[in-house]
Image (cartoon, rainbow, N blue to C red):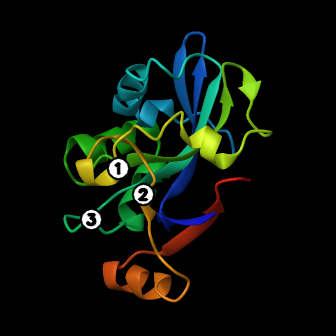
Amino acid sequence: MARFSRKYDGHCHYAAHHPWGWEIYTRRMDLASERFPNHIMNLNKLTHLGPGTILSGEMTSFDSNGVDNFKNVSRVCRSLPEEARKLIDSNEVPEPVFVIYDVIFHNYKSLEEKSYDDRTKLWMMLSTPKQQNLISRVEYFNLKPSTWMQTAKNNKWEGFVVTDGSS
């Protein structure tokens, strides 16, 4: 069954749980943890996601109306770690939110043979970005192909990603 999740306008990142703790990487696998120490602290609270877990998601920033702010998240993600932390600590830009949209490995095992529905069970209990937590999950919407575009426009969102839960 197809489902619609919001497409966030941000930067793809991965969170990997190593035996020594969590690290955050860019989509090019550059270490980015120094930019996100508060995210690391929050990931450490997810005790059901033990070592050998890799989460994929989007670092994104939201304005006061909940609309994605690509410029702000880019300033953090493209800055050196020390400068990124200064931008956040001075409240010049808000702390980005890591929005999880999939889990690739769990307990050192690849999940490529598991369906999307089975994989989401590992992180579905997390809050959505509306709750303003640093670690969040994608939101799903009950839409039809005839209504998704207008919904995205009305909310000033980039769009939707269509997933098949059985894939």
Circles 1 and 2, Cβ within 8 Å, touching? The answer is yes
Instruction: Single out the residue that lies furthest toward the front.
Output: 1
Three-letter code for the amino acid on which mark 3 is drawn:
Gly
Which numbered disc, 3 or 2, marks the residue closer to the eye? 2
Q: Mark 3 or mark 2: which comes first in sequence?
A: 3
Q: Which mark is residue 139?
A: 2
- At label 1, counting other C-alpha atoms closer than 10 Å, the crowd grade (few under 14, some 14-19, many 20 or more) is some
Q: Is residue 27 visible?
A: no
Residue flagged by tag 1: what amino acid is it? Thr
Q: Amino acid at mark 2?
A: Glu
Residue 48 image position (x, y, % from top left): 48, 20
Residue drawn at x 21%, y 68% is 65
Q: Residue at x 29, y 41 (%)?
A: 133
Quadrant (top left/top right/bottom left/bottom right) for the N terminus: bottom right
* Disc with the residue nearer the chain's start (1 vs 2): 1
Please, what secondary structure does the residue beneath circle 3 have?
loop
